[in-house]
Amino acid sequence: MKICGPKYALCGLVLSTWGIIQLVLMGAFFFIRSVALIEDVPVSEFTSLNEFYTKIDAGYTQNAFNCWIAACIYIVTFLLSGHQFYVNSRSSLSV
């Protein structure tokens, strides 16, 4: 069943590929606690150094999981776009 045209499907494939690569890498860098991403870690108020480290670790881990979840959503978009690209290429050969 066609949902979109071939150009739209190809655009979805390209954007999904880039989104998967970027979000998997960002998730990996959050997971290894990259200092360059410290500004993206939400931290509320803290009273001691141990509490600060605990909140920072939790923030890095949460951001890593969020990136990986978004990458999984991009995988679904990639599969849908790939299916549409295949359907459109098959229908153009049949006609």
Image: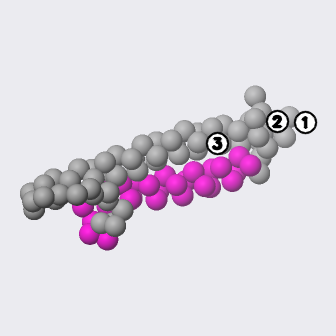
Tell me: residue 84, above or below residue 16: above
The residue located at (9%, 59%) in the rendering is 48
The residue located at (34%, 67%) in the rendering is 39
Q: Which residue is mark 3?
A: 82
Left or right: 15 in relation to 3: left
Amino acid type at circle 1 is: Val
Residue 32, image x, y percentages = 24, 59
Helix, strand or loop at label 1? It is loop
Residue 91: mark: 2
Q: Nearer the viewer, residue 2 or 68?
A: 68
Furthest toward the right, the residue is 95
Disc with the residue nearer the chain's start (3 vs 1)? 3
Q: Residues within 10 Å of mark 3 (few under 14, many from 20)?
A: some
Residue 68, image x, y percentages = 39, 47
Amino acid type at circle 2 is: Ser
Q: Nearer the viewer, residue 70 or 51?
A: 51
Count the labels in the image.
3
Q: Which residue is mark 1?
A: 95
Tell me the mark number nearer the camera, choosing from 3 and 2.
Answer: 3
Q: Is residue 14 magenta?
A: yes
Amino acid type at circle 3 is: Gly
Dots 1, 2 in contact, CB < 8 A: yes
Tell me: residue 58, above or below residue 89: below
The residue located at (26%, 56%) in the rendering is 44
Q: Quadrant of the C terminus?
A: top right
- The stretch of residues the image draws in magenta is 8-36
**In whole angstroms, how far apart are the C-alphas of marks 3 and 2?**
14 Å
Q: Quadrant of the N terminus?
A: top right
Dots 3, 2 in contact, CB < 8 A: no
